[in-house]
């Protein structure tokens, strides 16, 4: 007997898509997921994996096991034929083309790191969006120390290797700087003591302050805290170019580096960039109060790739998570012919780790910082991990790092 359930095509495996997959009624929909990444990534803890505080596998969950009956294709969606309701896709590896017919489509493909067209960024910088990015950064950090430890090497030959530059003063850039400092101070200092005096961590921000999404007092606290940790924070520092050995600022100053991590905001994915659908000036899909893309009635979008027309929300994990769950409920109600309700986002505050067992919390009227907030930070992220298995693995990772230290093997 032919399956008469409508086909819901989900593009992406990020917070929005994964939340929808978890909440959709599979008795009412045929669920098909197309994405090049075959797992969900708990990105708020990604900076911790760059230095081995948390293992890579502890913050990912396979998409195939998310729901019974789900069909998954590891591929890219390259085009949507909205008139005929067909998604044109290509396999991730051999780029073999195929089509997926749909009744409803959910676009949760996220965003890519925005390079702003600056020369050298794509070629010489590391991004921090995926597990592979974190793995590459971890490899490079340890390699910088191993290369610098060559015997009888003059200072001028290795000093630049131990200069770590982070471009972007948002939560990801700040948390990576904090995790890197912890790794160097608590672990690498034991095995490379002669090199530590030459280490420099520099955080570059084009704007006037860091952590602009947080209350200004928390941003100021972070700057003072970083100053005590000898992490240099430079605001109003616009990058003009990145060469093979230096970050060039708009004033012509050159900052030598061993590693550059680029974390300066979001840009559109190739799919979103090519879609003939309403978009704002930053090329995000414009949706109505029901998370439905304008001018359509069967295309929904949430997360970093979308913006609500009359209620723009920050591109954060909790917005995507709540939005994905909301769209699942609306689709369930739509098939059940129930009345739809507009999306009502409930802000639960923001958290950020700043190193040295200290964190920030901006909970609206309540602001906090320091050690007790770090306990809150860990507790909150632990509860937000999806599966019990991941929660247990992350707890063991934290315990292992506390007792035995972080691994400094390069692989």
Image (tube, rainbow, N blue to C red):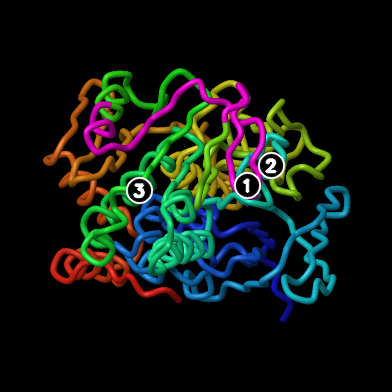
Write down the residue under mark 3.
199
Q: Earlier in the sequence, mark 3 or mark 1?
A: 1
Write down the residue under mark 1.
112
| Circle 3/circle 1 CB separation < 8 Å | no
* Image coords of residue 47 (percent x, y): 39, 53
Q: Marks 2/3: CA distance?
A: 35 Å
Q: Is mark 3 on a helix, strand or loop?
A: loop
Q: Earlier in the sequence, mark 2 or mark 3?
A: 3
Query: Relative to 54, does residue 72 appear above or below in the rendering?
Result: below
Write down the residue under mark 2.
268
Using residue 389 as the reference point, say whether residue 402 is left or right of it.
left
Q: Is mark 1 on a helix, strand or loop?
A: strand
Q: Marks 2/1: CA distance?
A: 6 Å
Q: Which residue is drawn at 56% across and 75% down?
A: 69
| Circle 2/circle 1 CB separation < 8 Å | yes
Q: Residue at x 65, y 33 (%)?
A: 287
Query: Relative to 200, does residue 184 appear above or below in the rendering?
Result: below
For the record, the magenta segment spans 224-253
Q: Residue at x 50, y 58 (%)?
A: 18
Viewer-nearest residue: 362 or 11: 362
Could you tell me which quadrant the N terminus lies in?
A: bottom right
* Image coords of residue 335 (percent x, y): 60, 52
């Amino acid at each position: 007997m032919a399956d008469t359930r409508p086909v819901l095509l989900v593009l992406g495996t990020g917070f929005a898509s994964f939340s929808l997959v978890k909440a959709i009624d599979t008795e009412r929909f045929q669920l098909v997921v197309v994405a090049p990444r075959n797992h969900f990534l708990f990105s708020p803890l990604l900076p911790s994996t760059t230095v081995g505080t948390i293992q890579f596998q502890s913050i990912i969950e396979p998409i195939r096991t998310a729901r019974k009956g789900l069909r998954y294709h590891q591929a890219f969606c390259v085009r949507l034929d909205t008139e005929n309701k067909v998604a044109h896709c290509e396999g991730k590896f051999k780029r073999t083309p195929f089509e997926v017919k749909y009744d409803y489509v959910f676009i949760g493909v996220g965003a890519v790191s925005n390079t702003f067209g600056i020369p050298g960024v794509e070629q010489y910088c590391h991004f921090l969006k995926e597990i592979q990015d974190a793995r590459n950064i971890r490899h490079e950090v340890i390699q910088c120390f191993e290369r610098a430890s060559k015997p009888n090497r003059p200072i001028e030959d290795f000093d630049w290797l131990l200069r770590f530059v982070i471009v972007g003063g948002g939560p990801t850039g700040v948390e990576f700087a904090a995790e890197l400092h912890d790794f160097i101070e608590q672990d690498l200092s034991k095995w490379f003591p002669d090199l530590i005096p030459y280490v420099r961590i520099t955080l570059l921000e084009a704007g006037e302050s860091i952590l602009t999404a947080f209350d200004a007092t928390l941003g100021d606290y972070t700057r003072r805290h970083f100053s005590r940790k000898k992490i240099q924070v430079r605001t109003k520092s616009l990058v003009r170019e990145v060469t093979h050995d230096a970050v060039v600022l708009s004033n012509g100053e050159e900052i030598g580096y061993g590693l550059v991590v680029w974390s300066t905001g979001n840009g559109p994915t190739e799919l979103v960039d090519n879609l003939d659908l309403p978009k704002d000036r930053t090329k995000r899909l414009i949706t109505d109060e029901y998370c439905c893309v304008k001018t359509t009635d069967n295309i929904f979008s949430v997360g970093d790739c979308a913006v609500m027309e009359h209620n723009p929300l920050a591109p954060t994990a909790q917005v995507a998570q709540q939005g994905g769950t909301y769209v699942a409920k609306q689709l369930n109600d739509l098939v059940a012919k129930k009345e739809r309700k507009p999306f009502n986002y409930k802000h639960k505050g923001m958290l950020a780790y700043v190193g040295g067992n200290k964190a920030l919390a901006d909970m609206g009227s309540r602001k906090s910082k320091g050690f007790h907030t770090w306990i809150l930070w860990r507790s909150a992220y632990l509860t937000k991990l999806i599966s019990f298995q991941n929660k247990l693995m992350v707890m063991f990772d934290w315990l292992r790092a506390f007792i035995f230290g972080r691994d400094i093997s390069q692989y």
